[in-house]
Amino acid sequence: MLQTRIDLALYHVNGQLIYEAYLDQEFTVVNTQLFLEKRVKGIYFLRITTNSGIVTKKVIVH
């Protein structure tokens, strides 16, 4: 297993931080869910930061 920290941040397209979470645990696979059904329809960006790097994904809420 690998000990590391994972930072999750969800931003609205206008740059506003909507959600932030930190996972600091031993893991081999991380599975987490963000419930966005109560969010305003639009485009968001999910930034995932680990000690291996940063990944940003576009999320569209219909």
Image (cartoon, rainbow, N blue to C red):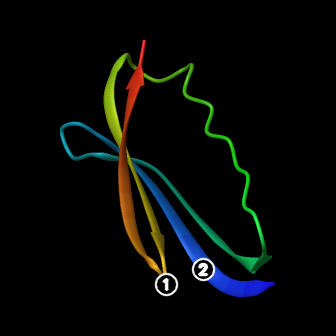
Give the residue pinned by disc 1.
51
State whether residue 50 is above or below residue 48: below
Q: Give the residue at x 21% y 46%.
A: 15
| In the displayed structure image, the side of residue 44 where residue 5 appears, left or right | right
Density class for disc 2 (Cα within 10 Å; few <14, some 14-19, many ≥20) is: some
Density class for disc 1 (Cα within 10 Å; few <14, some 14-19, many ≥20) is: few
Task: Point out the image quarter for the C terminus.
Answer: top left
Query: How many numbered marks have been drawn onto this rendered protein structure?
Result: 2
Residue 17: horizontal and vertical position, in percent?
34, 50
Q: Give the residue at x 37% y 16%.
A: 41
State whether residue 47 is above or below residue 14: below
User: What is the C-alpha distance between the residues marked 2 and 1?
Assistant: 7 Å
In the picture, residue 43 is in which quadrant? top left
| Front of the two marks 2 and 1 | 1
Residue 30: horizontal and vertical position, in percent?
72, 60
State whether residue 22 is above or below residue 3: above
State whether residue 41 is above or below residue 19: above
Give the residue pinned by disc 2.
5
